[in-house]
Amino acid sequence: MEQGNYSVGLDIGTTKIVAIIGKENEYGKIEILGIGRSKSLGVHRGVVNNITQTIKSIQQAVELAEGNSGLKISSVVVGIAGQHIRSLQHSDYITRAKSEEVINEDDVEKLCNQVYKLVMLPGEEIIHVLPQEFKVDGQAEIKQPMGMYGGRLEANFHVVVGQVSSIRNVGRCIKSAGLDLGNITLEPLASANAVLSQEEKEAGVALIDIGGGTTDLAIFKDGIIRHTAVIPFGGNVITEDIKEGCSIIEKQAELLKIKFGSAWPGENKDNEIVSIPGLRGREPKEITLKNLSKIIHARVVEIVEQVYVEIKNYGHDEQKKKLIAGIVLTGGGSQLKHLKQLVEYITGMDTRIGYPNEHLAGDSDEEIASPLYATAVGLLMNAVQNKAKVSEARQEVEDKEDDHGVFTGEEHTQTKTAPKRERKSIFDKWSEKLKDFLDNAE
């Protein structure tokens, strides 16, 4: 199969790196062609801290995916997360010189570009500028101002900001692994695409993606992203606490958490005990499940409470901003037993576990439909959409060229129109800027 027919998402996580190859089938669903997963060794809390190790892990995952599918990977869509990501609300406006003409895409673009000129802290750069609602000449709550008349166009923006060096390091790893950077997107947005339905986004929903190193939050209301945050704790700190609390090695702590861990301590009886083999002939250790779940419970409560503070910061308590669809949990950490009940208990909001199977073809492997792969599936969906946009724009240009063959008496003249300017989203432009930036940094 030629490279034109499939796309690749690459999730660079703290505990694992996943490369996932897929294409859109005739029903508009994503068909998974191959998947490769490797242990992530150079990433800490969502940020690359060892370039060489990360490159090795990326290459390993890519090779596995290529082996599984028999396809060659050249370009990937990557997600970024990490504790350096923060978001802010901003309002801006432009005054149009010709108010008798209708507002077009260029006006909206001009307004968005103006937001990019905001002065950030040293070393920070704007990643996403997401318009919320527009106002035209003071008329509020306009979702789409295109085609309207007006002299003053203003909008509220959700601006996502991140550290330039962290983003540059991710780009560097991709290039050094011999791949092209197709696009970069924010991981909470990718996960949201994979597990949330449009109805939930309309009603108001908080997506909590509990990964190994970070917990990502994305809040939607009226179909628009309203708030994003990255909390620098994830499943790894729970493992770390078990390791310290029970004086065992990390590998055993991780296994204990997965097999016997529960977020609700009342669940276990006092006499339920797990025996762990000692190191190098030492006596085995006995750990009560009640103690284990107490350790887990304490840390999970801390993570959930931090997320809940962010949900309140968004304004969930106000009637107009209420999140009717509640909370959706996804990511590897969401598989912890009784976590759903604990989140409902702390926040008082309806909660469900999010599986990325809604957009996958019916015959997909069950393993891929696990919350573990939510971000990877979301990135793959992003890659597929990008590919569709590009081919659509190409098709339009070709159709225009075909329509303009003009035949005049003696000679046959072919007049070609200038190719239609392909409309890029603000974010595609940002990706291009970043790619140039990375090329120059070599």
Image (cartoon, rainbow, N blue to C red):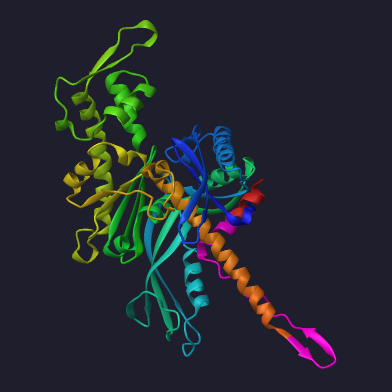
* 332 and 156: which is toward the camera: 332
Q: Is residue 178 in view from this perspective?
A: yes
Q: Quadrant of the C terminus?
A: top right
Q: Quadrant of residue 159?
A: bottom left
* 270 and 395: which is toward the camera: 395
51 is higher (above) or lower (below) than 438? above
28 is higher (above) or lower (below) than 77? below
Instruction: Count the marks.
Output: 0
194 is higher (above) or lower (below) than 212? below
Q: Quadrant of residue 431?
A: bottom right
Q: Residue at x 47, y 72 (%)?
A: 111
Q: Residue at x 42, y 64 (%)?
A: 130
Q: Quadrant of residue 260?
A: top left
Q: Residue at x 51, y 65 (%)?
A: 426
Estimate the x, y position of residue 418 in percent, counting from the top left. 68, 78
> Which residue appears farthest toward the front when viewing the image?
363
Q: Residue at x 47, y 90 (%)?
A: 100
407 is higher (above) or lower (below) than 39? below
> Which residue appears farthest toward the bottom when viewing the image?
409
- Left or right: 228 as drawn, with respect to 268: right
Q: Which residues are magenta?
A: 406-434
- Does residue 12 show up magenta in the picture? no
